[in-house]
Image (cartoon, rainbow, N blue to C red):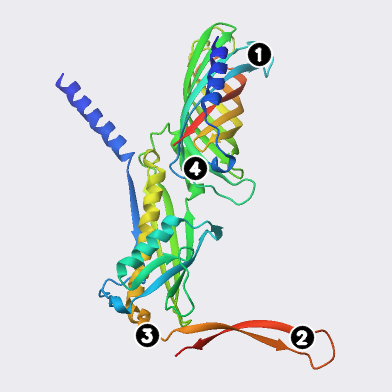
């Protein structure tokens, strides 16, 4: 009787441990190589702040162009807002500014790399199925996600500063613990790590974005006529733009 | 009677499923997306040798669960995803005797994802199968058997989460030589059903 009870307890323990280990998952985010933890918090006096306009966001996934999302725009603007370097943040379509206004124009490029290890997943799936799911707790799947963020900030005088950050992570999961939210969590962590790295780099150049750091420029259009010496076709008109420093 | 119930189920499913605008029907199936489905069909016999004499046939019901384990891979017409899961197979043999069969089969499926709403797939499944038809026919002697299934089908997405499936499967039932005679039963199974993704 006692032996039966103990064997039942053992069976319950084995079953529960197998079930619990069959529903485990973890997310590992690799720290960015350029990330520095010793960045001192910097901000600009409110009178010296200029607006920042997020002009363009380009997203690609494994080299293929993707549609950018408004959530991503908001997330980046939120991170920039928390730096307290800019007076106002907006999307290009929300706000237009005059040529004489001092403003920073931002361009963001996101290059995502995703590897769900399809070949490995297929044969592991076959093995798990063949074992009638008995091997599901011990055979885990991997999902790699990496992103490279390039942020270009163009000052009102045409000077461009480029910041780059790389971040990557891996989700490890068992068959029964997989879910789309797990992948969303991984992407969220990796993206956050990349954006944080970008912000750390940006803060170091805080003085570059001071309103008094450079005079405002005007962009005027000049028309140049190019005329051939020999007799021939009519002159070709070429339009170019050139910055002119205002006083 | 069962076939009528099946058709009623299919028609009710189509009528109650809200059809959305084409551009909003593109399903977002990624790693971790689960699929539960119910398919039904009618089993038709194949007598491949002179020793096969039984014309077994009947309705089959197949509730299933699948887990998507890859994102879409490939860039050409073969772009697709692998999913893994299990299926319960119930067959009510109506010929030559009213008997029953039930099995549990792990299943692997490759779904072609090159098109948005229409997604062909190939599937393979196999597992234990119990039937009381065995012993009453000359081909099979033991009630404990195995069932192997290979087939193809097509999913038509009515909403991003709901798909109507039609397809064909080839079934082989035998006992892996554990008892003789063991000629095996071979059948075709055209089927239809619904899948829900979450």
Chain designation of label 2: A
Find disc 1 in the rendering and name its residue.
Answer: B51
**Whole-percent x, y for residue B65 in the image:** 45, 31
Q: Helix or strand or loop: what does disc 3 sit on?
A: helix
Determine the image quadrant of residue A50: bottom left
Mark 2–mark 3 Cα distance, whole angstroms, equals 42 Å
Label 2 sits on residue: A235
| Circle 1 crowding by C-alpha within 10 Å: few under 14, some 14–19, many from 20 | few
Label for residue A213? 3
**Disc 3: which chain?**
A
Disc 1 versus disc 4: nearer the observer: 4
Query: Looking at the rendering, in which quadrant would you find the C terminus of chain B?
Result: top left
Q: Are marks 2 and 1 on the same chain?
A: no
CA separation in Å, label 2 and label 4: 58 Å
User: What chain letter is assigned to the residue under label 1?
Assistant: B
Mark 3 vs mark 1, CA separation in Å: 94 Å
Residue A220 to residue A43: above or below: below
Q: Estimate the spatial distance between the alpha carbons at disc 1 and disc 4, rounded to whole Å.
A: 46 Å
Q: Nearer the viewer, residue A17 or B29?
A: B29
Tag 3–tag 4 contact (CB < 8 Å):
no
Check contact, mark 2 vs mark 3: CB within 8 A.
no
User: Which quarter of the rendered picture does the N terminus of chain B lie within?
Assistant: top right
Q: Which residue is mark 4?
A: B29
Closer to the chain start, of discs 1 and 4, is: 4
Can see residue A44?
no
């Amino acid at each position: 009787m006692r032996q039966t009870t103990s064997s039942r307890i053992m069976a319950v323990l084995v079953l529960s441990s197998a079930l619990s280990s069959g529903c485990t998952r973890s997310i590992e985010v690799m720290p960015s190589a350029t990330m520095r933890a010793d960045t001192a918090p910097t901000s600009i006096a409110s009178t010296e702040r200029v607006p920042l306009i997020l002009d363009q966001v380009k997203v690609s996934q494994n080299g293929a162009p993707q549609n950018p999302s408004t959530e991503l725009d908001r997330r980046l603007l939120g991170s920039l807002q928390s730096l307290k370097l800019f007076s106002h943040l907006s999307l290009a379509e929300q706000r237009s500014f005059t040529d004489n206004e001092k403003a920073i124009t931002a361009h963001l490029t996101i290059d995502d790399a995703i590897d769900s290890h399809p070949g490995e997943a297929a044969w592991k799936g076959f093995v798990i199925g063949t074992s009638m799911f008995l091997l599901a707790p011990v055979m885990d799947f991997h999902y790699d996600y990496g992103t490279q963020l390039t942020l270009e900030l163009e000052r009102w005088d045409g000077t461009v500063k480029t910041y780059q950050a790389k971040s990557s992570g891996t989700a490890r999961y068992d068959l029964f613990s997989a879910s789309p939210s797990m992948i969303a969590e991984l992407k969220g962590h990796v993206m956050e790590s990349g954006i944080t790295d970008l912000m750390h780099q940006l803060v170091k150049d805080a003085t570059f974005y001071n309103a008094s750091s450079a005079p405002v420029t005007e962009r005027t259009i000049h028309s140049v006529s190019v005329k051939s010496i020999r007799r021939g076709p009519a002159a070709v008109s070429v339009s170019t733009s050139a910055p002119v420093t205002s006083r | 009677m069962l076939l009528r119930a099946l058709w009623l189920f299919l028609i009710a499913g189509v009528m109650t499923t809200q059809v959305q605008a084409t551009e909003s029907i593109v399903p977002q199936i990624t790693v971790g997306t689960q699929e539960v489905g119910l398919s039904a069909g009618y089993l038709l016999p194949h007598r491949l040798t002179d020793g096969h004499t039984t014309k077994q046939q009947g309705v089959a019901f197949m509730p299933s669960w699948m887990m998507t384990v890859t994102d879409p891979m490939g860039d050409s017409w073969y772009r697709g995803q692998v999913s893994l899961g299990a299926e319960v197979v119930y067959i009510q043999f109506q010929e030559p005797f009213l008997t029953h069969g039930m099995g549990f089969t792990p299943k692997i499926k490759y779904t072609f994802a090159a098109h948005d709403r229409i997604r062909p797939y190939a599937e393979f499944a196999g597992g234990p199968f119990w039937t009381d038809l065995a012993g009453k026919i000359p081909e099979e002697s033991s009630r404990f058997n195995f069932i192997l299934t290979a087939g193809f089908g097509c999913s038509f997405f009515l909403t991003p989460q709901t798909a109507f499936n039609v397809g064909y499967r080839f079934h082989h039932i035998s006992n892996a030589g554990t008892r003789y005679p063991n000629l095996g039963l071979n059948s075709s199974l055209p089927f239809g059903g619904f899948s829900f993704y979450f």
